[in-house]
């Protein structure tokens, strides 16, 4: 096991992993609220290019970020493997298209 994946108290760090392009990323599972299939995303005028828009998830409006665009990679059409990972970052709920 990679020693960097252990917390100081020897508790195992659990990650949700995903690939974007040729890279693999991980998010602490405790920050992930849910993983959903893509759904209708409402565009937001004058938003940065990497913001796909917002979704309404059970009454909450959640901004959706396309990580491919955010990292400067070519856009890719959504397919059967595309998911939205809904996570909490600094008390803000956001969805990442992966």
Image: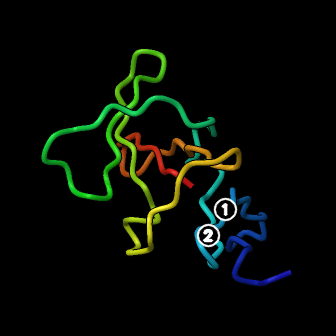
48 to the left or right of 79? left
51 to the left or right of 20? left
Q: Nearer the viewer, residue 5 or 10?
A: 5
* Mark 1 surroundings: few (<14), some (14-19) or many (≥20) residues within 10 A: some
In this view, the residue farthest toward the right is 1
* Mark 2 surroundings: few (<14), some (14-19) or many (≥20) residues within 10 A: few
Per the image, label 1 sits on a secondary structure element best described as strand
- What's the residue at 61%, 45% (across, down)? 83
In this view, the residue farthest toward the top is 59
Q: Nearer the viewer, residue 17 or 50?
A: 50
Residue 5 in picture, x, y percent from top left: 72, 75
Mark sitting earlier along the chain (1/2): 1
Residue 92 occupies which quadrant of the picture? top left
As drawn, the label of residue 25 is 2
Q: Looking at the image, do the residues carrying marks 1 and 2 touch, with CB atoms under 8 Å apart?
A: yes
- What's the residue at 64%, 48% (across, down)? 79
């Amino acid at each position: 096991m990679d020693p960097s994946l252990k917390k100081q108290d020897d508790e195992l760090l659990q990650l949700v992993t995903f690939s974007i392009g040729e890279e693999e990323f991980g998010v602490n599972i405790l920050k992930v609220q849910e993983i959903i299939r893509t759904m209708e995303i409402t565009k937001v005028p004058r938003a940065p290019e990497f913001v796909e828009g917002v979704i309404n998830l059970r009454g909450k409006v959640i901004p959706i970020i396309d990580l491919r665009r955010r990292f400067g990679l070519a856009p890719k059409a959504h397919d059967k493997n595309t998911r939205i990972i809904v996570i909490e970052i600094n008390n803000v709920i956001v969805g990442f298209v992966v």
